[in-house]
Amino acid sequence: MSDDRDQGSGIRDQTTVLGCSGLRKSYWQGQVEVPVLTGVDLAIAAGEQVAVMGTSGAGKSTLLHCLGGLDRPDSGEISIVGEPVWSLSELARGRLRNRSLGFVYQFHHLLQEFTAAENVAMPLLIRRQERGAALAEAQHRLEEVGLGHRLTHRPGELSGGERQRAAIARALVTNPACVLMDEPTGNLDRHTAAQIQGLLGDLSAQHGTAFLVATHDPDFARRLGRTLQLVDGRLIEAPRNPL
């Protein structure tokens, strides 16, 4: 059997939690077409930690938005845990995202008026899970990321690293197959960024969660299992360098 990690493999088999084949996306500036993704193939297996690097404007965020079912590609196939994303209804696509994907951004997007526990519980409350059970699961996730002592603190009372840890806990609270992260350490110092990367490794090992991380930070990328470069709208495998 060929390795799911081979670049260009695209959607492969049942071990792939997130995959795409021939993904294309362009934007229009007036009457001028600006290609962003020109044929992306990708397959991510359970538990993989994959970095996507590229220059500003290369299309990293566009790629994550398409893979997450937030932005419709012009062509190509996307599969999340075997489900063909863009053949689903909008309602079914939303349910698939809520069940199988987590999202973490450069800016944590925590709701200022809610506590850390309430913020983390929000995806479960949205799916109408009973509040007590949702908060209990949120507490468990916050304890996993080292914030068990910050349950009742609001975002303004947390440090930058703590807010990002809370955002990671929120992304994990639904037990997703894969978490998409867009510049998750962009606003953090190098020491805190290294702590976040170590946390991803621990969570991936414990739960088999896959992480796809768009980042400008080569040190952060090197600490993940695989690094891809987005060049001219396509993904190419980056050579592994020693830490």
Image (spheres, helix red, strand yellow):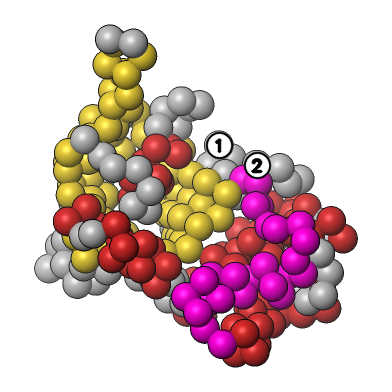
Task: Answer whether labels 1 and 2 touch (C-beta < 8 Å).
Answer: yes
In the rendered image, which quarter is residue 115 located in? Answer: bottom right
Q: Mark 1 = which residue? A: 216
Choose between 47 and 242: the one closer to the eye: 47
Is residue 23 rendered to the left or right of residue 200? left
Q: Which residues are magenta?
A: 106-130
Which element carries disc 1, helix, strand or loop?
loop
Q: Is residue 139 above or below residue 225?
A: below
Q: Residue furthest top?
A: 31
The percent position of residue 105, horizontal first and vertical second, equals 57, 49
Which residue shows up at 78% across the image and 52% down it?
160
In the rendered image, which quarter is residue 236 located in? Answer: top left
**Label 2 amino acid?**
Gly
Q: Mark 2 = which residue? A: 186
Is residue 86 rendered to the left or right of residue 189? left
The percent position of residue 96, horizontal first and vertical second, equals 33, 67
Dividing the image into 4 quarters, which one contains the N terminus? bottom left
